[in-house]
Each structure stands twice: as structure tokens, then as C-alpha cells.
Amino acid sequence: MSNSAQFVIAGNWKMNGMLDESLKFIDSLTENPNPTAVEMVICPPYTLLHPLAKPLAEKGVTLGAENMHFEASGAFTGEISPLMLKDAGCHYVILGHSERRDMMHEDHALLRKKLEAAWKHGLEPIFCIGEHLEEREAGTTNDVLKDQLAVLEGTDSSLPLVIAYEPVWAIGTGKTATPEQVSETHAFVHEELARLGRKCKVLYGGSVNPGNAESLMACQGVDGALVGGASLKADSFMDIVGAAARVAT
Ligand code: PEP
């Protein structure tokens, strides 16, 4: 189910995007310079999933959602189910974004249920992990990531999964982790995934932009990017895709 491209460049639009401007965004997307090396993904807000599914597919872009409930249907006012995401044409769903962990208090037990529900209904989770600044400064980054990844313990390792390592202090702040920090941390995440019996892509996220994308994608163990702010404009999103295509081997 997972795409075989070397890099995944996924845009997380968060709570941004109106229909008209989003259709213009798609119109302005230029051709993926190397679709076998780079998969393009857009995760818009729920209201845009259905209307954008076809235009994105026509541009070779995979659709993802930003979150979901773990139940398939029922009395959960205001929630979106995995079946609804499938019905809208989603392949991916972002789970465990730090904004949801921090603001909506999503914990490990809830995220485990969401992961299982995504797999049950044929969605591929983009599971976000990452440390806060105090944790990096205290030298506990690897402990935090290990704890967050422990949610995968005992799950079926043949089920599709993408990890996004996003240091919380780098999200939306304009600060990026240095290439050394990125390589070191991705090496640890891959090692920990191997210990859990998994081999999967690990994206980097945190203020990725056209100016830093090439050096970040060139870091050992980086298999793509989860991009917030810079994914809202077609030209900067395409520049990041282009940077990944240049780095692809
Ligand atoms: C994100 O929200 O996942 C993200 C990485 O945001 P930004 O690129 O804006 O830092």
C-alpha cells in the first residue's frame, strides 16, 4: 500500500484553506519532476477533502487528512471517522501531531486506538513524534521519542506506516534542527523502529522551506518532509518537491 518513492513530501494545511483558493493552488502546481522518486501529498482540512480529491489526483498528488476519530460511526458530534476519510478518497491520515497532543491532550492510549482504526479501514498513518525544547535541552530527546514510539509495540509490522519526526520547537517557529541533529535523531528513530520490527519512512518536519529543504533531505535517514506553512503556496511546495527530486538517488 505504501508508495515506493524514495521521498514523501506531505503538506499539512492545518486550519487553513478555502475552496476557491485551494482550487487555484492545485491549478498552479507544476509537474512533479520525478514521480518515481518523490510522492506529493496534501492534507487539507476536512471541508476540502471531497472537492480536492479529484483535482489533486489528476495532478498526481495523494490525499491525506489531518486527524480522525477511532470509531467508524456513531454519536460523536463534530468528529470524523476513518470510513469518511476513505469515502473522501484519502490514503493517508496524520495522527499524533504535536498540536493535537498539546492542545487536545491526545495521549498514547488514544493514539493507539486511532492507529488501529486507521489500519482497520485501510488508511496509512503519518504518525508524528517529537520533543519539546525543554526536553531537547535536558538531553531527554531519545527517551521522549522512544516513549512515543512505544505506542507501536505489538502492532502488526506489515501494516503501512510513515513516521514524521517533528521537534516541537521547530514547528512554525522558523527554527530548524541542524543537519547534525536531524541525522542523529533520525538514526535513533530508525534504530528504535527496527527494534519494534518496523522498517518505514521517517519524514522530518519543522519549518521546512525552499531554502533549507535540500540540505534537510540530504541528511542520512530522512525520507521526506511534513511541511506546514511552506505547503500553503504552490510555488514553495513545488520548490520543496524539486529539492527532494534533486537529492534523490
Ligand atoms: C507541521 O505542522 O507539521 C509543520 C512542520 O509546520 P511548519 O512547517 O510550519 O513548521
Image (tube, grey):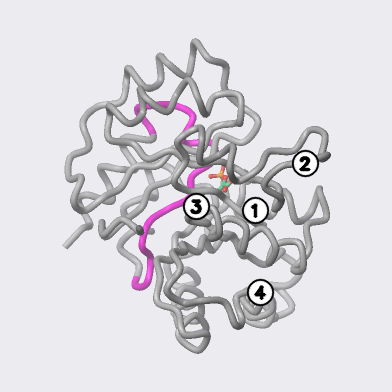
Checking the image for residue 151, the label placed there is 4
Distance between the alpha carbons at the discs numbered 2 and 4? 25 Å
**Gap between marks 3 and 2, in whole Å?**
19 Å
**Of pointers 2 and 4, the one earlier in the residue sequence:** 2
From the image, tell me which residue sits under label 2: 74
Asked whether the residues under the numbered discs 4 and 3 touch, taking CB atoms below 8 Å apart as contact, a structural biologist would say: no
Q: CA distance from mark 1 to mark 3?
A: 16 Å
> Residue 147's quadrant in the figure?
bottom right
- In the rendered structure, the answer to whether residue 209 lies left or right of residue 37 reads right
- Separation (CA) of disc 4 from disc 3: 17 Å
Q: Is mark 1 within 8 Å of ligand 1?
A: yes
Which element type, helix, strand or loop, lies under badge 4? helix
For the N terminus, give its image quadrant: bottom left
Mark 3 or mark 2: which comes first in sequence?
A: 2
Q: Which residue is labeled 3 in the image?
A: 123
Query: Looking at the image, is mark 4 or mark 1 nearer the viewer?
Result: 4
Task: Name the residue carrying label 1.
Answer: 97
Q: Residue at x 28, y 51 (%)?
A: 244
Callout 2 touching callout 4 (CB < 8 Å) = no
